[in-house]
Amino acid sequence: MATGQALDAEVIVIGAGVSGIYELHRLRESGFDVRLVEGGTNVGGTWYWNRYPGARFDSESYSYGYFFSQEILDEWNWQEHFAGQAETESYLNFVTDKLDLRRDMRFNFRVKSIVLDESDDTWTITAEDGTALRSRFVVSATGVLSVPYWPSIPGRERYQGEAHHTGLWPKSGVDFAGKKVAVIGSGASAVQLIPEVAKQAGELVVFQRTPNWNSPLNNGTITDEEQAEIKATYDEIYRSCMNSFAGFVHSASPKRTFDDSKEERWALYEKLYHQKGFAKLISNYRDMMTNREANAEFSEFIAEKIRSRVNDPAVAEKLIPKDHGFGMRRPPMETGYYEAFNQPNVTLVDLRETPLVTITEAGIETTAGEQAFDIIVWATGFDGFTGALTRMDVIGEGGRVLREQWAPGVVSYLGAMVPGFPNFFLAGGPHLIAGNFPRAIEIMVDYITGLLEYAREHGHTVLAPDEEACARWTEEVHAVADIALMAENSWFRGANIPGKANEYLPYAGSLTKFRQRMAAMPEQGYPGIVFGTPALV
């Protein structure tokens, strides 16, 4: 592309989820000429695509939403402590309309490639239909869970029945009434879906490879009294999130596990078990995720709870993880999951004992034989953190391709930029702080926006991360991950994707410390960033 060709926008944001909506608002408020493109037909991101029955937050609704507008906080009333998909999608549409963001959004724009023009350091974003847009800066807000993973099981394409992936659920819904249904997978999506399908299906067979440490969400509707308290304490809720380790409202315990007697420990475990959401993890003893003996004890507590909730002891044992402890993979929060296996219409198939052989025209064949199904649901997760970026052809300096550069492992600067890709930013991808993701995304969006404001103020039009700064940051990501007890088979390590580098993909450090680091960047002149202007040609 010839240097000097007109830009379609100064900045193009890719993705209309939680991060993209906020980035568009921040950049527009800062006076940038900005446009947003989105592959779907509306806003919502994860909450647009994942509309399967039971889909909902595992962070408290009032800690997940935006805090930048008092007017939005005043006008929106969350109906549940952990909002379902429909409520969350409605909220994101409400925010979009309230801020009049649609006029700068373009839907049905599925990005195929993002290519750097090195003559002037601008980018061309091309859609699958051939439409192309050009901008100086690109912000990828494609999220950490936006590319559904379909495992390479023989015969999947020849199945003649109805098949759906939880991450690509039809807007029209799925009728399970009286049907024979198979659910393949037992991750967070399956844990939410299975109790709902069990209420409707004539027969439900769950094909499980690896069980998870699931614990009660303890959701409920928000009463008028609770609503009033939430409204009155939003400032406190926000401070609690932003001054916590992982962005949740729950307070950390100051104690270590074996500071207490066993009776005191198990009394705390029982209390936490009945609290909402991630209290089981966040408000537990401070060494639960660093001391194997401490972790093993809490894991045994949860195992006893599973045994008490599942009638068949053999089924209960199959639902208890044996290869990792509680919290070593992000533990799904459930409502009635274990009780579903007490229903006469629900059967569990352990794929480690009875491996899946092939998908047939009629259903599923394991080593025990073939079963026919009306519907197969693939609850097989996502190519997390990097999938949306590596699926596109992102081509930077010297023709380097992002998916090839990251094949041995991700290298970034603060999770916000990538070496060799100037003027290209990540608002939510690998090396994002693990935890309550919207709070981490807020920090990242504010950093990117501030960096672009700083560059404009100082007359810089080319921004690139320093290679040594990228290496140091990536080493820090790996170092903090090594401290915590992390399961080798977690999707946080890309272990669910064959051939993907085995590395911890988010940042396991403290959100509070990361926020402080990012807040100090403007007065420090944004260290780690090389500023310039396009080379003369």
Image: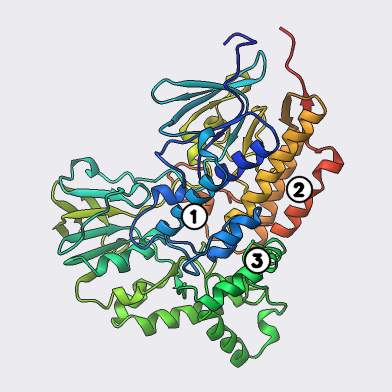
Secondary structure beneath label 1: helix
Determine the CA span between mark 3 and mark 1.
17 Å
- Tag in front: 2 or 1: 1
Identify the residue shown where x is 73% and y is 59%.
Answer: 512
Q: Which of the two discs, 2 and 1, labels the residue nearer the N terminus?
A: 1
Residue 444 in sight from this viewpoint: yes
Q: Which of 210 and 255 is in front in this view?
A: 255
* Amino acid at the residue labelled 3: Tyr
Disc 3 to disc 1: CB gap under 8 Å? no
Name the quadrant containing residue 459.
Answer: top right
In the figure, 496 relative to 130: above or below?
Answer: below
Disc 2 to disc 3: CB gap under 8 Å? no
Identify the residue shown where x is 63% and y is 35%.
Answer: 425
* Amino acid at the residue labelled 2: Met
Identify the residue shown where x is 20% and y is 49%.
Answer: 162
| Crowd around label 1: few <14 · some 14–19 · many ≥20 (10 Å) | many
Determine the CA span between mark 2 and mark 1.
28 Å
Q: In which quarter of the image is the C terminus?
A: top right
Q: Which of 471 and 520 is in front in this view?
A: 520
**Which residue carries the number 3 mark?**
234
**Which residue carries the number 2 mark?**
518
Residue 91 disc label: 1
Name the residue furthest right. Answer: 523
Q: Is residue 83 left or right of residue 411?
A: left
